[in-house]
Image (spheres, rainbow, N blue to C red):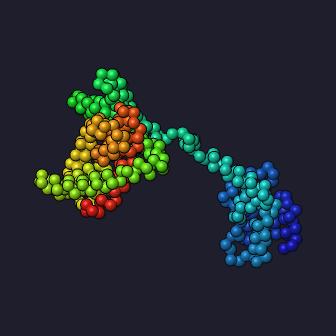
Amino acid sequence: MVGVSRLINSGGSSAEHMLRRALPSSSRPACLLNYGPFTDSSPRPNASRVIAAPPPQTNVDPNHRKLWTTLAHAHRPCFSHCKQNRTFASPPARPSSTAETENAGVQRSSQADLERPASTPRRNSEQPTPSTLANLQAVAPGVLASAAVAKGGFLMAGAVSPYVGGVSGIPCAILLGMAANNAAAGLPGARPFLAALQPGLGVCTKGVLQAGIVCVGAKLSLAEVAALGAQGVPVVMASVGAGLVFVPMLGRYLGLPPKLSSLVAAGTSICGVTAITAVAPVIKASEREVSLAVANVVAFGTLSMLALPTAAHYLLGGDSAAAGMLLGVGVHDTSQVMGAAVAYKEMFADEIALKVAALTKLTRNLLLAAAVPGIA
């Protein structure tokens, strides 16, 4: 046994030949049983036919079986044709050093890069996605239309002011927008055009308008809030209390449903559409009642925004604080109050009225949390 192992270790075709002579034909390994002796110029066999396990004979000498195992795991020269292709059923060799490990990782990364489809290039995170571009294209028409109407309103106010006195561009822009909308609605085929403007108009009426309100609040100092806001608290409490009590009574007198009267009272007394949407689920109002209340608040709030600045200035003798309080409690929605206050500032160059109106309206909004349980 030892002599055969030494002979095999010497390598060469002579070792293969001597191994064939030393082992019986019934006990030879599969690679020697199926193939003849090999030389450097001999063709290599199919690797799939070479196996490392011994054949399943029952009359195999234990010494021969041990020799097969030794040869299979050591890859001796008699199996030189198998060693080059790694055809034995042995686990893959692990890298013996850190450099080999890094090389193996680089090879796997290179193989993964080669297998990656060429049709899916890497996208830069800074580039706008198709959804972002689609959203911008959807809102652009409405935003541009709003800007054009606003600019037209201020140009109209500048043209009319020399003849009728100071006129603000805000009411002119509102009237111009209403006229343009009604005129376009009567044209044939204008419905798709108006529908395309809705996303941008929604952005302007919510995001841009609310951002403007925040900017007005940012201009107020804590001293101004303490001084001007304290004056408006009694007026706000009296106004909200009177609205919540007398509007439902007036609704019952006119034969309106109780829930509709409650919605109108909340919208008129506190903060317009926001109060209506907050009270509606509590009293379980129907969709029709909510729509009627919102239409009432929007219609009368718009009329108040257009007419009240001029009326407040002449009725109150130009008192800035009183005019600001009247605008803050007399106009329904927050955006409408700010529109009326800015119009008053432009017409009469009065910054104090704008600040008082903003603080008064914010004080009204704070009473929403206390008014909802009372209405319910």
Instruction: Please report the residue visible at 41 percent of the width from the left and 41 percent of the height from the top.
Output: 352
* Residue 202 is at least partly visible in this image: no
Query: What residue occupies the far front of the structure in this picture?
Result: 317
Left or right for 121, reference 251? right
Left or right for 246, reference 165? left
Instruction: Please report the residue visible at 77 percent of the width from the left and 74 percent of the height from the top.
Output: 66
Q: Where is residue 345 in the image (x, y as percent from the top left)?
A: 38, 35
Judge by depth and name the residue closer to the eye, 49 or 59: 49
* In the depicted structure, whether residue 335 falls above or below residue 158: below
* In the depicted structure, whether residue 242 falls above or below residue 69: above
| Quadrant of res 38 | bottom right
Q: Position of residue 79 (x, y in %)?
A: 77, 61
Judge by depth and name the residue closer to the eye, 109 or 266: 266
Badge count: 0
Left or right for 303, reference 321? left
Judge by depth and name the residue closer to the eye, 110 or 122: 122
Instruction: Please report the residue visible at 67 percent of the width from the left and 72 percent of the height from the top.
Output: 56
User: Can you say which quadrant of the picture contains the N terminus?
Assistant: bottom right
* Residue 15 is at least partly visible in this image: yes
Q: Position of residue 237 (x, y in %)?
A: 31, 55
| Quadrant of res 154 | top left
